[in-house]
Image: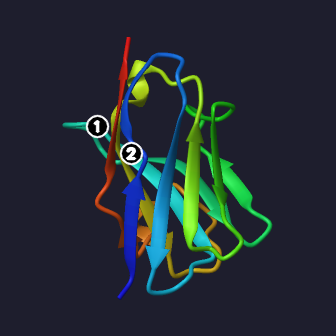
Amino acid sequence: QVQLVESGGGLVQTGDSLRLSCAVSGRTFTTMGWFRQAPGKEREFVAGIRGSVGYTYYADSVKGRFTISRDNAKTTVYLQMNSLKPEDTAVYYCAASSLGYISDYSRRALYDYWGQGTQVTVSS
């Protein structure tokens, strides 16, 4: 069975860095993504990655600060978060798509599998 398990979240201060990890089991995926959701808000796209060479896509709110990457075996996907801000506070979810390519990585409906999330809290 496919399982995505996030880790690496925690409580940090403004300007700090965190690296989230998503362990993938059951199968491999060409297309992976990170989303986040704050209480009472909609789940929003953060970053996506496709292919072995790592084509990447970012939400405007995190571009230049966050970096998505994956290991060679496609068993782990990472989200390096630098210069964290209080508005980055959310539960971060790893997601996988059965599609080899999607034109809009921000569309939640295109992802088939989701992790249970890891909490990231950034204090001011």
- Which quadrant is home to the C terminus? top left
Q: 70 or 59, which is in the foreground?
A: 70
Which residue is labeled 2 in the image?
A: 36
Locate residue 53, reporting x and y percent: 80, 66
For residue 38, above or below residue 69: above
Residues at discs 2 and 1 in contact (Cβ within 8 Å):
yes
Neighbor class of circle 1 (other Cα within 10 Å; few <14, some 14-19, many 20+) is some
As drawn, which residue projects farthest toward the left? 40
Give me the residue at 59% from left, 29% from top: 82
Give me the residue at 75% from left, 72% from top: 52
**Which secondary structure, mark 2?**
strand
Locate residue 1, reporting x and y percent: 35, 88
For residue 89, above or below residue 67: above
Q: Which mark is residue 79?
A: none
Instruction: Identify the amino acid type marked 1.
Output: Ala
Quadrant location of residue 37? top left
Give me the residue at 70% from left, 55% from top: 56
**Which secondary structure, mark 1?**
loop
Locate residue 73, reporting x and y percent: 66, 76
Q: Is residue 115 left or right of residue 82?
A: left
Q: Is residue 31 left or right of residue 91?
A: right
**How many tags in the picture?**
2
Distance Cα–Cα, label 2 vs label 1:
7 Å
Locate residue 55, reporting x and y percent: 75, 60
Which residue is labeled 1 in the image?
A: 38
Neighbor class of circle 2 (other Cα within 10 Å; few <14, some 14-19, many 20+) is many
Give me the residue at 36% from left, 36% from top: 10
Instruction: Identify the amino acid type marked 2.
Output: Arg
